[in-house]
Image (cartoon, helix red, strand yellow):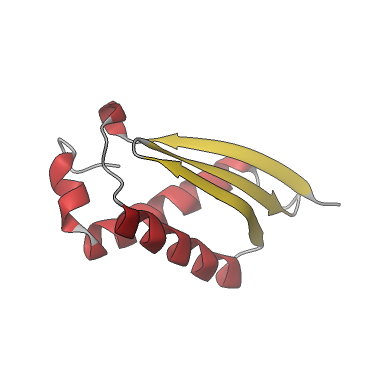
Amino acid sequence: MVLLYHFVFLAKYRKVVFSKTAVQTMKTICLEIEKRYEVHFLEIGTDKGHVLFLIQSVPRMSATQIITMLKSITAREVFLKHPEVKKKLWGGKL
């Protein structure tokens, strides 16, 4: 059995924060997440203020676990590689 999830992550305050290089970094991070966790990214779509994910996963992982893992890893890595994103967000949280 496999589950499909459609998640939309909005940037804090709906600010325009994602440049083309930040989006490419996020996609690369997601490919690395696939190798470590039981998730598969079918689609990753972005606009300047939000990111859309279509994720395939096993029933052992709840939606909450997937979101927590995904938000913490991507935010940490994007902030490390693109400090301008963190600077645009008041409080430094994605």
**How far across and how far down the image is residue 57, in percent?**
70, 53
**How far across and how far down the image is residue 74, in percent?**
39, 56
- From this view, report whether residue 35 is shown above or below residue 68: below
Residue extending furthest right? 1
Task: Say which quadrant the C terminus sits in.
Answer: top left
Q: Quadrant of residue 35?
A: bottom right
In the displayed structure image, the side of residue 11 where residue 38 appears, left or right: right
- Count of labels shown? 0
**How far across and how far down the image is residue 50, in percent?**
40, 37
In the displayed structure image, the side of residue 57 where residue 64 appears, left or right: left
Residue extending furthest front? 20
Q: Residue at x 66, y 63 (%)?
A: 38
Q: Nearer the viewer, residue 58 or 51?
A: 51
Q: Residue at x 48, y 52 (%)?
A: 70
Q: Residue at x 29, y 32 (%)?
A: 12
Q: Nearer the viewer, residue 44 or 64?
A: 44
- From this view, report whether residue 1 is shown above or below residue 90: below
**How far across and how far down the image is residue 17, in percent?**
26, 42
Q: Residue at x 45, y 37 (%)?
A: 9
